[in-house]
Every structure is written in structure tokens, then in C-alpha cells.
Amino acid sequence: MEKIEAQEQLEENAVASSGDTNIEEFDHERSKRLNRRLDFRILPLCSLLYLLNFLDRGNIANAKVLNQETGDDLLQKTGMTASGYSLTVTLFSLAYTLFEVPSNWIMKHYVRPSVWLATLLGCWGALTLGFAGVQNYATVLVLRLLIGVFEAGFFPGIVYLITIWYRHDERSVRIAVVIAFCNLAGAFGGCIAYGLGTANGGAGLEGFRWLFILEGTITMLCVIPTLLVLPDYPARAKFLSPSEKKFAEDRLKERGGGYSRDHATRKEVLETFFSPRMLAHYFAYIANVVTQGSFTFFTPTLVTGLGYGSIQAQLLTVPPWVVGFVVAILVSYSADRLNARGWHITVISVIGGAGWLTAGLLPATSYVQKYGALVMAATGAFPAAPLCTSWVTVNSPSLLTIPFAIALHNSCAGIGQIIAQWIWLDTRTGNFTCAACNFFVAIVAFSLRICYGRMNRKGIKDARGEKRVWSY
């Protein structure tokens, strides 16, 4: 271990000495001051927008069981079957898989981040609002597919924006802050659904229709603030002086980052898509998202299956999401500080796997124990996501393919969500599959950590033939 760390330090010094931001001369205090300003401008807005993204993504799960005792849930009002619901969310996830890479391509080469993200936001907000008027299964299917098309590029776009502004060892915790708000979205979604469930029948509308009206309206109201507040790149930042713009760009030259419209070579693109270590990242993320997707689409159903009513179930979905939020922030901060993403992913994935396994082995009537296991599983499902994403941004085969690595990595989430939507036809199968996925993530993370240690010791260069320090 000491040899690896010593070699890594030598590599870091060698890389830094060849750039404009020599570590010995680098102004860390100035960088911290800049980060505080960036955090104020970027993180609150991006976190809010991703919260809305996740609310609109998961509201169909709340609508599925909301007021089902009175026959006023989404399924009964539209004639949708359980398999029809699974097909609907499968097509939604397929749209995510297909449109994330093209979205980041457009944002990198043709449209400013603020304009592109605001466009996506407005489109899926309008479609969510329209969802309140669905009367049949066909309409649900089409609208949900279109929502998936426009939501697909939003999160990889936010991650790419973070790489434009932040250094390699500052990204995990920022990505975690943004992703952690999906945990709050799960919590808020349950609370909102609970409140609107009690308003069922108001103005002649079912509770699930009010859910889509409220969340769609809030999303559309955020389009203008996104256009006006979200900064695009340092060169366009009106809140920075010329010297601050130069510093913001120069500080990213170590280990990559920043904004560039340069095109990658065929070799760089192929390595980003198909090199064994990158495929390991992608497959691990698919497995992790199976567990995330289980929470997103089926937590209300799972809690209802523990013996609670549909409205009670909305409130009881909150604690697992809150636990995931807190653990995600703490673990990501620690991983950035210690440059130890692999070890952190390994540990939390083992804990999460143990939670799913326990839930599957317990008797069906052990409601309290199974609920505790569900909370335990949340510590493995959500905190691993920002670490996996950040790890890809710092270890992309080429600095020019970072946005595509981000998009491809996150497009794998669509595959994971599709798997998640079909494993819960039987509860025990769902629990055991999620446990296996978490343990698989732990094995891959452990293996990648060893791999990057060896790459640093051997001085392996990137796809452009440039010296790199591979992050752990």
C-alpha cells in the first residue's frame, strides 16, 4: 500500500510539473474561495432541478398505489395491469438508455449547458403536467416514453457541467450532493403523495392527478431561473473577473476537466466505450441501479406489502431515502478526501447486499425486521452512485471523452432500471437479485481499485499517449 501511494505521489508531481498549475505554486486558498462562489451558484440550483427530475421520474410509483383502496389509483382509472405498468416503466428506462449519449454530445458541441438543461426541463415538465389528464393505458405509455426521452440527458448534463467547473478531487462530494437530492425526492415524493392522497376527489380529480399537476407545474416554473442563473463555462461567467476566469480554467488542467469542443480520435472513443476496465465500470453501475431502481419504482409497493395501507406506505417510504441521503454525503466527502472511491464503494455495497439478503430470508410476517433491512439496503443502493459516477469522470481513457463516458455510464442506468422493473413480480426474487447485484458491485469496485494501483505503478498512459495519474 505504501509503495502504491508513494508511486502515485511521484506521478502526481510529474503531471503537475508539466502543466500550468504546478502543485507547489497552486493557490489552494484562492481555489477554495472560487469553489465557495461556484457552490453557491451551481449546487443549490442543480440539486433542486435533480430533485424535480427524480420526483417526476418516480411519481408514477406513488400514483400506482395512491388511493387504491377506493379504486382511485392510476392502474384502476386507466385500466392498466401490473405487467402493463412494468412495460411502461421499461420503455421509460429504454428511452434513458438511448438518449443520454446524444444529449451530452449536443451539449458539448452545439448548445450551452444552461439553454440545453432548461429545454429538457421545460419539455418533461409540460409532459408531466399533461399526465394529469390520462384516461387510458395507451396515453400513459406514450407520455411516459416521451418523458424518458427528455429526462434522459439531464443528469449526465449536470455531471458534465460539474467537470467543467471543478477539479478532479472536488467532484465526488458535489455529485453526491446533487444525487443525494434524489433521496430527498423519494422522501418528499412520499410526503407529497400522502398529502394529495387525503385530498382525493378534490375538484373532481383523483389524488394521483393532483400529484402530476403539482409536480409538473413546479418543474416548469424552474425553466427561467435555470436560463438566468446557471453558469455555462468560465469564459462566459459574468460574475468572474478576467483573472478569475483564467484561474478557473487553468486549475482544471491537472488530470483533466474544463470545457473543450475538440473532437476525440476514433481510438479514444473506442477505448471509452469498449475497454475492459470501462466496461467493468458500466456493468457495476448497471448492477447498482438495479437496487436504486427497486427503491424508485417499488418502495411504496414494498412497504404496502409489509402490511401497511397505501397512504401509510407513502410516509413509511421516507426513512430509507433519508438514510441514503445522509450516508451518500458522508461517504462521498470521505472518498474525495482520501482518494479511496473503490474501497468506499466496496464497503457500502456489502452492507447494502446484506440488507437485501436479510429482507429475503426473513419470514413474510416479520414486518418490522424487514423494514429495518430495507433501510439497511438503502445505504448500499444510493451512496455508491455518486462515487461510481465520479470515478468514471477522473479515469476516462481520454480527457476529451469525459462527457461521453459520463453519458454512457449513466445510460447504463436505463438497463438497470429495466431489470429492476421485472424482478419484483415475486418479492423474494427481487430481494435476492438486489443482494446479488450489490455484492457484484463490491467485487468489481475492489478489482478496479487493485487495477488502478497497478496502472499507476507501471506508468500506464491514456488513450492519447499522455501521462496520467489514475484515481482510486
Image (cartoon, rainbow, N blue to C red):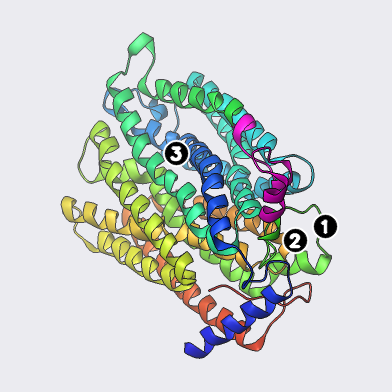
Q: Residue at x 26, y 37 (%)?
A: 315
> Magenta part mainly helix, strand or loop?
helix
Magenta region: 226-248
Q: Is residue 131 visible?
A: no
Question: Residue 163's quadrant in the figure?
Answer: bottom right
Single out the mark in the foreground, 3 or 1: 1
Q: What residue type is labelled 1?
A: His
Q: Earlier in the sequence, mark 3 or mark 1?
A: 3
**Mark 3, residue position:** 58
Neighbour tally class for label 2: few under 14, some 14-19, many 20 plus, Cα within 10 Å = many
**Residue 339, relative to residue 189: is it above or below?**
below
Percent x, y for residue 319? 27, 46
Q: Which of marks 2 and 3 is nearer the N terminus?
A: 3
Question: Residue 11's quadrant in the figure?
Answer: bottom right
**Mark 2, residue position:** 400
Residue 194 or 15: which is nearer the viewer? Answer: 15
Q: What residue type is labelled 2?
A: Leu
Q: Residue at x 63, y 36 (%)?
A: 150
**Residue 272, relative to residue 61: is it above or below?**
below
Percent x, y for residue 420? 45, 52
Q: Which residue is drawn at 56% across and 82% down?
A: 453
Q: Residue at x 34, y 12 (%)?
A: 202
